[in-house]
Image (cartoon, grey):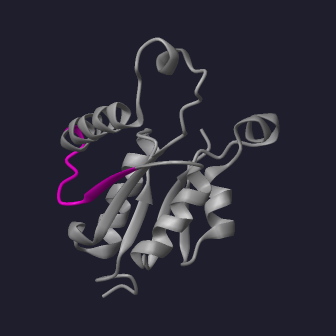
Amino acid sequence: MGYFQGKKILVPVDFSESSLEAIKQAILISEDPALVTVVHVMVPLDLVSPGVLFGGLTDEKRTEHVQKYAKEEFAKHQIEGVTFETLVGDPGIKIADFAKEKGTDLIVIPSHGYSGLTRLALGSVAERVLRHSPCPTLVLRQPKK
């Protein structure tokens, strides 16, 4: 019996292979997919974005699309029984706030392992989650190829 068995686990995803693998690892850790919540955080839309100005793009439409996409990806990767949520905001902060709100016991987050200028340009969601997390956080690093 593991330390986190029977406890709430949160897995932030960007739908990369590493994030889908993180879901599988979280299910193994918890031993119950019902205790795993998967969350995808969308960056807020700018009022001057072409989709907003000309196409009527809304957060509701984006959420519907992400929900559908998640269902397809989870089925493709044999991920069943988890709860899926979509949020809008700054990913690092929103994930930490959501974990606190839900009483999460562990966050399992993949890291793409960027370094140097790439990390500086793209930022690090995993690092921000680590800094603001209200609970233990397990960062799954990508193996170097």
Residue 67 position within the rendered picture, expressed as x and y whole percent measured from the top left: 27, 40
What's the residue at 44%, 38% (across, down)? Answer: 16
Specify whether 24 is left or right of 56: left
What residue do we see at 40% from left, 74% from top?
102
Q: Nearer the viewer, residue 55 or 81?
A: 55
| Quadrant of the frame with the N terminus | bottom left
Q: Which of 43 and 84 lies nearest the eye of the viewer?
A: 43
Quarter assignment of residue 28: bottom left
Q: Residue at x 25, y 74 (%)?
A: 31
Image height of 75 relative to 99, above or below: above
Left or right: where does residue 71 sit relative to residue 97? left
Q: Residue at x 60, y 49 (%)?
A: 90
**Quadrant of the snapshot with the C terminus:** top right
User: Residue 77 lies in magenta, yes or no?
Assistant: yes
Boundaries of the magenta span: 76-86
Residue 38 x, y percent position in the rendering: 35, 57
Q: Position of residue 26 (x, y in %)?
A: 36, 65
